[in-house]
Amino acid sequence: MNGTTNATTVPPKTASVTTNGQTEKKYRPWNDFRSDTFTVPSDEMRQVMFEATDGDAVYEEDEDTKKLEEYVAKLSGKEAGLFVTSGTQGNQLCIRAHLHQPPHSIVCDDRAHIYNWEAGAIGLFTQSIVRPVAPKNGKYITAEEVESKLIVGDDIHFAPTSLICLENTIKGSVIPIEEIARISALAKAYKIPLHCDGARLWDASAATGVSIEEYCSYFDTVSLCLSKGLGAPIGSVIVGPKDVMNKAKWFRKAYGGGLRQSGMLAAAGLLSIKQNFPLLSRVHRYCREFTEYAESLGVEFEVTPETSIAILANVNVAILVDEAKKAGIVLMGPRVVFHIQITADAVDRLKHALKRTVERQKLEPDVVAKPGEFKVGY
């Protein structure tokens, strides 16, 4: 299609799959650009899940869960890992484990997931306030900006800073390792723990060549998602010192997150790292290809795409979503997310939809979306 020809007949999003003589329809998200969370387990992953151990993880008796936790801990260079059900849970367990006696405050990017997309969990679980930082460069916060928000000392009018949080990647942008090192040094100088929401740290590593271990070395704790980008059906692994992970495990139980027969999920998560982490370079290539095509049409982006996410800035979203539907792809707003199950055909269809959008919005300037109709998503 290459962004120029008319859309052909739209293939279905489901495919008929025959297993042991039985035919069933399985969802195949080859054309779904809403998020990298819409991937589904491959047949190999389903088999690994079927063969997984079924011990009780609350009693630390499940071998596949232990294997996953130990593998990610070693990969990240940390003492211990803990399997949790989601990135939100992982972040909040780390945050809660770092904070002790209120009052306290947290410094983070004003676009951060922990601040905007986790249902107010910081205030709910920690009684902490957030002091958000708006990055002047539009991509990432700097050590100077973080330091300007720190509250230190014993002035009783203010809640002292007890934690700094970074997110890498954030909106698809990679925080330079040099800046992470500077913020880490700042945190150590003030004796403030540093946490990383590394839901898409896999993407940062794939894009830069910086290892997961090197990234994690600058943080006290890190949350690594398995279902964003890597294709696992559920889960994240948090890593850090043993005492912090033990405290997090305690809170995981208190929050109702104790896992029983988690082996099938852990086995899927381990396979997702070993099998799918290397595929992210192809995902990023698709994103770059789309970015270059979009720029040739005069389309701009909220932030220059660097990994798997492209957020369109100057397109009519209502027209875009309509043209995407006609082209046989799925969007829910201006954010386009590439993942390991997107196909080259889907990328061509996306280009075609964008080209039609640019053409139509010149002719139909009165088409507008209803307030709140379309989301940026996460």
Image: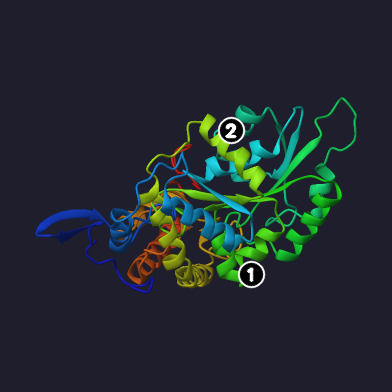
Please, what is the three-letter code of the amino acid marked with disc 2? Ala
Q: Nearer the viewer, residue 172 or 118?
A: 118
Indicate the quadrant where residue 132 lies: top right
Q: Residue at x 63, y 54 (%)?
A: 79
Q: Few, some or many C-alpha atoms within 10 Å of disc 2 (few <14, some 14-19, many ≥20)?
A: some
Position of 91 with respect to 40 (left or right) is: right
Residue 338, visible in the rendered structure: no
Q: Nearer the viewer, residue 224 or 143?
A: 224
Measured as percent of width and height from the top left, residue 39 is found at 37, 56
Name the residue furthest left: 21
Which image quarter is the N terminus in? bottom left
Q: Is residue 286 above or below residue 106?
A: below
In the picture, the disc for residue 121 is: 2
Position of 328 with respect to 238 (left or right) is: left
Measured as percent of width and height from the top left, residue 217 is found at 69, 60
Q: Is residue 80 above or below residue 116?
A: below
Q: Residue at x 68, y 27 (%)?
A: 127
Q: Residue at x 86, y 51 (%)?
A: 189
Marks 2 & 1, CB-CB < 8 Å contact:
no
Please, what is the three-letter code of the amino acid marked with disc 1? Val
Disc 2 on helix, strand or loop? helix
Q: Residue at x 51, y 68 (%)?
A: 291
Indicate the quadrant where residue 276 lies: bottom left
Q: CA distance from mark 2 to mark 1?
A: 31 Å
Measured as percent of width and height from the top left, residue 55 is found at 38, 45
Position of 293 with respect to 91 (left or right) is: left
Name the residue furthest top: 156
Q: Is residue 249 above or below residue 27?
A: above
Measured as percent of width and height from the top left, residue 215 is found at 66, 62
Disc 1 on helix, strand or loop? loop
